[in-house]
Image (cartoon, rainbow, N blue to C red):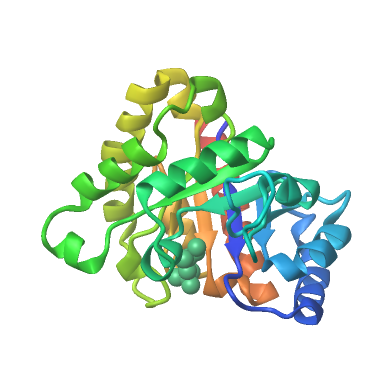
Amino acid sequence: MRRFFVAGNWKMNETVAEAETLVKALLPELEKYESVDKAVCPSYLAVPAVAGLCKGSSLKVGAQNLFWEESGAFTAEVAPKMVAELCDYVIVGHSERRKYFGETDETVNRRLKAALGAGLLVIVCVGETLEENEAGQTEAVVTRQLRQGLADITPEQADSITIAYEPVWAIGTGRAATPEDANHVHKDVIRPLLVEMFGKERAESMRIQYGGSIKPNNAAELFAMSDIDGGLVGGASLKADSFVEIIKAAAMVTIIIEESEA
Ligand code: 13P
């Protein structure tokens, strides 16, 4: 059975107090959609408060990054076991980390290994820039990001990984990829690569989220595509009603798929 995974990446938004208000608004609504896996990823500072509120609920908590070293003189960094103390998930390789903070495929790989070593579930982000897209390099870029980012990962470890395809030109622009274009990358580029790396059965059960201007009005058509297994939502996850609508869209598509298979 297909089970969608929708996560909210709050990025550098929401103070602790704002995060608490948002989660309190989300929790009673989101409990209605148990057929969908869901998570929110607040800033590190808001993680303890959000994790406390989410305890025992179906809303999981993720961090937006982590460092690969276990401890030591790395001012301002957060170690894998610190994240794992409070979070189920962590995001690595977000394009904003790549663009503004020097993240490379190699450091994505180091973070991924450290996160898996600490028992975290990991969302690995990939996606091409506008220039790369216009130059016809989408496949080459995503392939490189995955091959290098997921280097040395075993099939067993792959069970703890979600891939998020986030075309950079679609993030925060209000210009989402069309469902067909996004699905093409998921189905014809990412999934075959996962099959090659981890075998068919595992690759088929791995979830590939789409991210980039997902809104309540385009979520269902994206989730209805064969290889879009959920979403990584930025702006629309900062408002309780729009995030709930997106989760609801995933729940509705789940029902439609189940009925069509019955
Ligand atoms: P938006 O939904 O705001 O476009 O952000 C997507 C994103 O980057 C999620 O990680």
Eyeballing the image, is 238 above or below 31?
Answer: below
In the image: residue 33, left or right of residue 245: right
Q: Position of residue 199 (x, y in %)?
A: 40, 18
Q: Nearer the viewer, residue 234 or 42?
A: 42
Q: Quadrant of the C terminus?
A: top right
Q: Most extreme residue toward the left, as rendered?
A: 135
* Residue positioned 76% across, 63% down in the render: 47
* Residue positioned 76% across, 69% down in the render: 46
Q: Position of residue 157 (x, y in %)?
A: 55, 27
Question: How many numbered discs?
Answer: 0
In the image: residue 126, left or right of residue 110: left
Residue 192 in view in this figure: yes
Eyeballing the image, is 205 above or below 166?
Answer: above
Q: Indicate the quadrant where residue 93 lies.
A: bottom left
Q: Position of residue 249 (x, y in %)?
A: 57, 58
Q: Indicate the quadrant where residue 100 lies.
A: bottom left
Q: Indicate the quadrant where residue 77 lies.
A: bottom right
